Image (cartoon, rainbow, N blue to C red):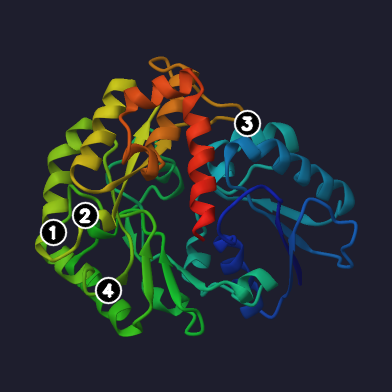
Amino acid sequence: MNVLLVEPTYKRKYPPLGLMKISTWHKNKGDVVVYLHGDSWIDLDFNPDVIYITSLFTWDLPQVIQVIKSFKKRFPTSEIKVGGVAATAMPDKIKRETGIYPHIGIIPEVDSCTPDYAMSNETKKSEESLVFTTRGCPWKCRYCVVRMLEPKYYEIKGWESGIDSSKPRILLFDNNIVRSSKKHFNSVMRILEEQNKQVDFNSGFDCKLLTKDHVAQIVKLRIKTIRLAFDKLEQEKPLVASVDLFKEQGINPDRIRVYVLYNYNDDLEEAKYRADKVIALGCKPFVMRYKPLDWLKKEMYVSPHWVKEDIVNFTYYYNMPTVWNTISFEQFLKERDNGEFETNRKNIKKLVSMFL
């Protein structure tokens, strides 16, 4: 069977892990697999029996839908399967506009497959092994798509097969690894320590569930940045406790990056409080602007308690340590209003360039 894997050319940071696993799954069956990163089939010399089209962000769905229609027209006898994050979040829209009802969530029989790192030049040259050791999260937060994409929490057996020994880094996407059993967590930490590669837990660690035993094992790894979250005011005490646990293990707080959700049910003052608290703890905030799970526009979403100007200023200020380390938010606003801020930044850049 001929299998075509299609990833539209929307902006993304990492290769399509789902398609990489589907590639392995079909190759294990003896199928011929071709991967296409693009919106057009014009240069494609291949007649597929089945086409998989992936998706990522909902605001890229118009592009994904156009790709689906294009491939339907060019390959009318091919079976087309659609999946991914955006397809899971808005399956009815895809059905209405293409006639195809997408797969929702992950494909269990595919999820246990080793990613096909030979699928493309990009995946061959990538320096990161892409890994899940667990799926799901117990909290089911309304602002998070994980509750739709991975509704059940489970541990993945044989996850370590996803590690490519030739790649220097391991990137783990577990949405809540500290929710796993002690046996699983200990096994993951042991394997990662034995690998002796640089490790990044992309989604971070759940402060509400993090314990001293967890931290004692985490700090043994070659982990450059430790990621936590402060998305709600009620997470303040767990966050402070988690930072203290890492400090007890000799971790300087400036190695801790804290996700700060904003533009959801909060307002500017609450968001500032949380971001300022992160800075007061010695950590670095990474502010993340909320968009509804069915947001289709490229334009900024502005929640009822925010205005666009505040969103722009908050994002600018708190995601730049060179700014919040030197001036207050109020001074920042004042300098932006009178045009001093941009002028000062240009002068600083010129000064720095003279010594480089």
Front of the two marks 4 and 1: 1
Q: Are marks 2 and 1 in contact (CB under 8 Å)?
A: yes
Which class describes the residues within 10 Å of circle 3: few (<14), some (14-19), or many (20+)? Answer: few
Q: Give how far apart the Cα atoms at labels 4 and 3 are.
A: 39 Å
Residue at the spot x=37%, y=53% of the render? 203
Q: x, y percentage for residue 96?
A: 69, 31
Q: Give how far apart the Cα atoms at labels 3 and 1 are.
A: 40 Å
Q: Are marks 4 and 3 in contact (CB under 8 Å)?
A: no
Q: Amino acid at mark 2?
A: Pro
Q: Is residue 175 above or below residue 65?
A: below
Q: Amino acid at mark 4?
A: Leu
Residue occupied by mark 1: 247
Q: Give how far apart the Cα atoms at labels 2 and 3 are.
A: 35 Å
Q: Give how far apart the Cα atoms at labels 4 and 1 are.
A: 16 Å
Q: Earlier in the sequence, mark 2 or mark 3?
A: 2
Q: x, y percentage for residue 207?
A: 20, 49
Residue at the spot x=47%, y=23% of the render? 336
Q: Which mark is residue 253?
A: 2
Residue occupied by mark 3: 298
Label total for image: 4
Q: Amino acid at mark 3?
A: Lys
Front of the two marks 2 and 3: 2
**Residue at disc 4, secondary structure:** loop
Q: Earlier in the sequence, mark 4 or mark 3?
A: 4
Residue occupied by mark 4: 221
- Classify residue 83 as left or right of residue 302: right
Q: Is residue 120 visible?
A: no
Q: Quadrant of the N terminus?
A: bottom right
Q: Looking at the image, which is closer to me, 273 or 18?
A: 273
Q: Are marks 4 and 2 in contact (CB under 8 Å)?
A: no
- Classify residue 246 as left or right of residue 60: left
Q: Give how far apart the Cα atoms at labels 2 and 1 are.
A: 7 Å
